């Protein structure tokens, strides 16, 4: 299959932050049409339940030659989750969060992706002594396990993030995400590697990819960039280009053949052009890896001579032989 490009569909419509509103409010059909106009775009990641509640969008996707790459279940934005979703003190609200995930799994099966990604950002804490950490962790694991058991033909991918909206999110880095997979103990549970979330957590995105792939848990990749101080969702490679090249190399090295969905927040720029540039930047990184040759890069890394490896990259970027 190889890597296919997708976009998180709400980014093709109206966007909001704490300070302003950007772009027109577009209906689902218009957002799908815009996504289809991006050169090289093959899929869309749609959000349940705010964007889609049933499989009626399938005909729209087919009309535009797009696939559903995943269903993104949002258990963070609704006011009911202000004290947590999977870890909410109210047992009925916790059960409701699980029901949202399982409904998203059923929808993913209907749409043909058989993949759900969930980022439990409402689950965490803001202050010392606010939560019982062991209880919060157990509740998160129990909730995700219950969701995974709903059906084993749909994969459930956990997207980790260090913070926002909670100051500390319960599954905040790659280590916790992998540990959660181990504790859940289900083959259909894995991890969404968001490049920007890894950067923000102080990780090497490529190393996180290697760890997840080694464990058989790399289910989905989100592409973006930031200054490592916040989750800015910038166009890939515009800040950390060497990291993007290493991500490109590592995805090839581990044999990843799934979706790369662009999680880019085009607040002040045209969304179609932002996604076009996201694909071009990603392909540029791929071209540099191809010019040097993955096998040559692998040998250079094994030789433990970082300056020689960096010289290969510099020469390739400068137009030399690499």
Image (spheres, helix red, strand yellow):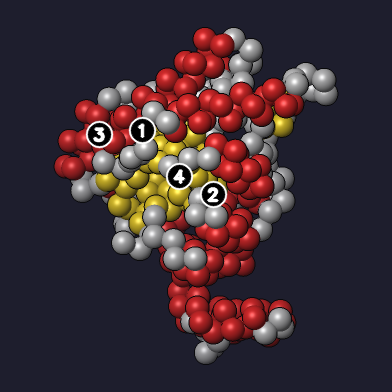
Total labels: the figure holds 4
Residue located 44% across and 61% down the image? 256
Residue located 78% across and 18% down the image? 130
Q: CA distance from mark 2 to mark 3?
A: 24 Å
Nearer to us in this view, 99 or 305: 99
Residues tagged 2 and 1 counted as in contact (Cβ below 8 A): no
Residues tagged 3 and 1 counted as in contact (Cβ below 8 A): no
Q: CA distance from mark 4 to mark 3?
A: 21 Å
- State the residue position of label 3: 110
Q: Position of residue 251 (x, y in %)?
A: 49, 64
Q: CA distance from mark 2 to mark 1?
A: 23 Å
Mark nearer the viewer, 2 or 1: 1
Secondary structure of the residue carrying tag 2 is: strand
Residue located 54% across and 84% down the image? 296
- State the residue position of label 4: 187
Find residue 151 and name its label. 1
Q: Earlier in the sequence, mark 2 or mark 1?
A: 1
Secondary structure of the residue carrying tag 4 is: loop
- State the residue position of label 2: 193
Q: Earlier in the sequence, mark 4 or mark 3?
A: 3
Please identify the quadrant where the C terminus is shown. bottom right
Q: Residues within 10 Å of mark 1 (few under 14, many from 20)?
A: some
């Amino acid at each position: 299959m190889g890597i296919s490009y997708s976009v998180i569909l709400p980014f093709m419509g109206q966007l909001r932050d704490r300070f302003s509103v950007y772009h027109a409010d577009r209906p689902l059909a218009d957002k799908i049409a815009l996504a289809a106009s991006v050169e090289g775009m093959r899929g869309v990641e749609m959000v349940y339940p705010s964007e889609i509640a049933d499989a009626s969008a399938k005909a729209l996707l087919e009309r535009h030659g797009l696939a559903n790459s995943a269903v993104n279940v949002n258990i963070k934005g609704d006011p009911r989750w202000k004290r947590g979703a999977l870890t909410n003190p109210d047992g009925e609200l916790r059960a409701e969060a699980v029901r949202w995930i399982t409904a998203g799994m059923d929808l993913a099966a209907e749409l043909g992706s058989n993949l759900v990604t969930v980022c439990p950002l409402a689950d965490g804490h803001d202050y010392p002594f606010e939560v019982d950490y062991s209880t919060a962790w157990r509740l998160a694991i129990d909730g995700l396990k219950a969701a995974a058991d709903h059906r084993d033909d749909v994969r459930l991918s956990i997207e980790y993030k260090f913070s926002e909206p909670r100051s500390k999110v319960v599954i905040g880095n790659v280590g916790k995400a992998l540990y959660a997979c181990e504790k859940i103990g289900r083959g259909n549970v894995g991890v969404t590697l968001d490049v920007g979330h890894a950067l923000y957590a102080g990780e090497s995105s490529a190393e996180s990819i290697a760890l997840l792939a080694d464990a058989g848990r790399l289910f989905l990749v989100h592409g973006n960039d930031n200054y490592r101080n916040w989750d800015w969702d910038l166009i890939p490679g515009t800040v950390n280009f060497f990291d993007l090249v290493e991500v490109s190399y590592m995805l090839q090295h581990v044999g990843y053949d799934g979706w790369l969905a662009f999680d880019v927040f085009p607040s002040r720029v045209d969304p179609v052009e932002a996604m076009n540039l996201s694909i071009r930047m990603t392909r540029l990184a791929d071209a540099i890896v191809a010019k040097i040759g993955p096998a040559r890069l692998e040998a250079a890394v094994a030789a433990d001579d970082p300056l020689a490896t960096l010289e290969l990259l510099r020469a390739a970027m400068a137009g030399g032989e690499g």
